Image (spheres, helix red, strand yellow):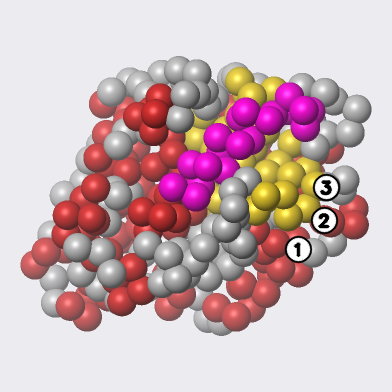
Amino acid sequence: MNSRTASVSDWRTWPQAELERQYDARATVPDIATELKAYRDASTPMYELTPCWRDVAYGTGPDETLDLFPVAGQPEAPLLVFIHGGYWRALHSQDSVFMAQQLTAHGIAVAAINYTLASQATLAHIVAQCQRAVTWLLNDAASHGIAPQRTVLAGSSAGAHLAAMLLAPDWQTAQGLLPQALHGGVLLSGLYDLEPVQRCLPNTWLNLSVQEANRLSPMQHLPHPTLPLYIAVAEHDTDEFKRQSRDYAAACSAQNNPITWHEASQRNHFDIVRDWMNPQSHLFQATLALLNGTPQQ
């Protein structure tokens, strides 16, 4: 199947057990604790190795903070904004800055957004928090050595869902941001249609109605047609995670978004994002190309 061609999923006809299996990312790795620990272990040294504004408030809530890693001596650096995954109920911005040293060394500033986790917050509230964070970054970019017109949003898993929601232009207009304020998106192993998610285990902490699942699905809020996107999955993602990414890529391609598609060989749902630590990886090189205005094909 062409990666940019929408697929046909018969998930509505599956037994519940199969639906649960397809959306259980943790079951695709031998030891989820090891995978999550690797995020924190790789992120913690970044605060000592790389200049950083830590726990910067972008809102009034206790979880409304971000960590920002500027590029020393570069007053107008492009910015990668990363939104962590964890099925909207786990992880923290402090687990999510493992790429900071390598990207800043290549002239790219990094921001990692924190948000209130489900079920302490609704998914709509989490989306709104991320919108506030990006608005704060774009409005205050220049004072932090960032070129706001060269900001790329990125996310992994549930974070890719949040990033994709923020790539849609409608909320940007409502916040008074300039048209096409964002420069592109990097979306890894994401969820873009929440209807099947609403019908399985994650909805025990999301508590979405069918209507809310539809309203909060990026498939209903596509980005501006000129926005370039890097959309990737891991070789060991489930078929449904891969389908979700293919369908989103196909919908965006149909409205002429420039799409770079990649399936990361020998990667799983959790370690695909750590390819940002390797400057030779496809993810790293594609991110540089996107931020420099020359997206790969």
The amino acid pointed to by label 2 is Met
Place of residue 17 in the rendered image (x, y in percent of width and height, measured from the top left): 22, 80
Residue 151, quarter of the rendered image: top right
Of residues 158 and 237, the one drawn nearer to the viewer in this rendering: 158
Point out the image quarter for the N terminus. Answer: top left
Q: Which residue is mark 3?
A: 52
The answer to whether one can see residue 255 in this image is yes
Q: Which residue is mark 2?
A: 46
Determine whether label 1 and label 2 are within 8 Å by CB: yes
Disc nearest the viewer among 1 and 2: 2
Determine whether label 3 and label 1 are within 8 Å by CB: no
The amino acid pointed to by label 1 is Ala
Q: Secondary structure at mark 2?
A: helix
Question: Along the horizontal axis of the image, is 113 left or right of 1?
Answer: right
Q: Which residue is mark 1?
A: 42
The answer to whether one can see residue 266 in this image is no
- The residues tagged by marks 3 and 2 sit, at their Cα atoms, a distance apart of 9 Å
Is residue 21 part of the magenta span, yes or no? no
Of residues 77 and 292, the one drawn nearer to the viewer in this rendering: 77
Closer to the N terminus: mark 3 or mark 1? 1
The amino acid pointed to by label 3 is Cys
Q: Is residue 102 above or below residue 71?
A: below
Q: Is residue 200 above or below residue 145?
A: below
Q: Secondary structure at mark 3?
A: loop
Place of residue 142 in the rendered image (x, y in percent of width and height, measured from the top left): 73, 24
The part of the chain drawn in magenta is 128-146
Judge the density around disc 1: few (<14), some (14-19), many (≥20) Cα neighbours within 10 Å.
Answer: some
Determine whether label 3 and label 2 are within 8 Å by CB: yes
